[in-house]
Amino acid sequence: MGGINVEGLTSTPFGTVARLRRPWPALSYAVTGVMPELPEVETIRRGLAPALEGASFTKVELRRRDLRFPFPRSFAKRLEGAEVTALGRRAKYLVGELDSGDVLVIHLGMTGRFVVEESTDGPKRRFEPGRFYDDTERIAAHDHVVFHLSTGKRVIYNDARRFGFMTLVKRDELDAHPLFHGLGIEPIGNEFGAEALVGLFAGKMRPLKSALLDQRLIAGLGNIYVSEALFRAGLSPRRAANTLAGKGALARARREALAEAIRRVLAEAIEKGGSTLRDYAKADGERGAFQHEFRAYGREGEACLRAGCRGTIARLVQSGRSTFFCRICQK
Ligand SMILES: [Zn+2]
């Protein structure tokens, strides 16, 4: 995803904006640890959908002019009166379809989170769908957008670091939009599977890890879950991607193992996110129940968890991102 800042000019995914907000963050991963990946965004989508779908926006309060990028012109006005017909997800974007013909696109950046307030009358019940990335308390000063709904609920967007953004796109322009144009297949969608990997990896000599992170091939698969899936599939992140695309039995076994590992890793993460949702009545201000249970990611120097393997998890930097893997059992 684009977004580079040069002096006085910001290139956004929606064109060039002549306003500098702040330089590209250098601190990111080390400071906040886990950033939302596909399972986190999907969990948030599932938590928000019951509040948003079928409701219309009675008022949209913008407490700032921008997040990572400025809000589009007339953002609040275009939303007010519109009904959310469906809340979907594409890669790591929440995609709210509106009966006005617009689509509300939201990216959570690193610290974007939502709070749903059940009622504006009487004692408020709040819940926060999906809370993974950060232990910090939500600070009201970082409540940047408040969506007032026809149901009396309020959906509040809070983002301490403001690397998230929102925009509106005409529904019939969505596929051609710079954010979505050229995005690869969804790893939890029906198109994805071992046979899809043949077409994606054929002729690709690059390392498997970098092919899996390529959003033009598979959309929304991030660094953490790629490391986890490769570990489970017993495949080295350095192996050439095309070694999974061949006609032979070995290539087929590798791609079947990988496709299965990707599906499982994502499904388990979403399921664990779901356990947070079930607890949401008491979730406001409390730490979510979700704990990442990684077998490889972040375990550098620790013993490999594969039964019978005496290896140690190593860390390797590929395309600027850390890969965690076992040199013994990942071939
Ligand atoms: Zn091992």
Image (cartoon, grey):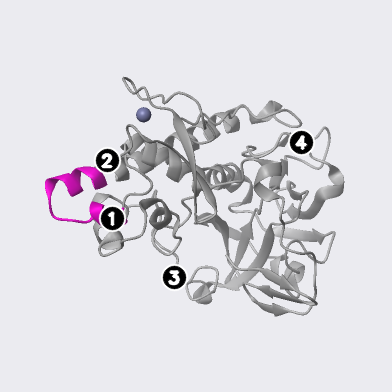
Q: Earlier in the sequence, mark 2 or mark 1?
A: 1
Circle number at residue 79 = none
- Decide: marks 4, 2 in contact (CB < 8 A)? no
**First-in-chain label (4 vs 2):** 4
**In-image side of 213 versus 279 (left or right):** left
Q: Which residue is mark 1?
A: 197
User: What's the CA distance linking mark 3 and mark 4?
Assistant: 35 Å
Does the Cβ of the disc 3 residue fall within 8 Å of ligand 1? no
- Going from the N terminus, do you reach mark 1 or mark 3 first? 3
Is mark 1 in CB contact (under 8 Å) with mark 3? no
Q: Which residue is mark 2?
A: 257
> Which quarter of the picture shows residue 253?
top left
Question: Secondary structure beneath disc 1?
Answer: helix
Q: Check if mark 3's residue and mark 4's residue have beta carbons within 8 Å.
A: no
Q: Is residue 293 magenta?
A: no
Is 273 in front, or is 316?
316
Using the image as rendered, state which of residue 310 and residue 110 is in the foreground: 310
Above or below, 52 against 1 in this view is above
Q: Which residue is mark 3?
A: 182
Region of the chain picked out in magenta, as a range: 240-255
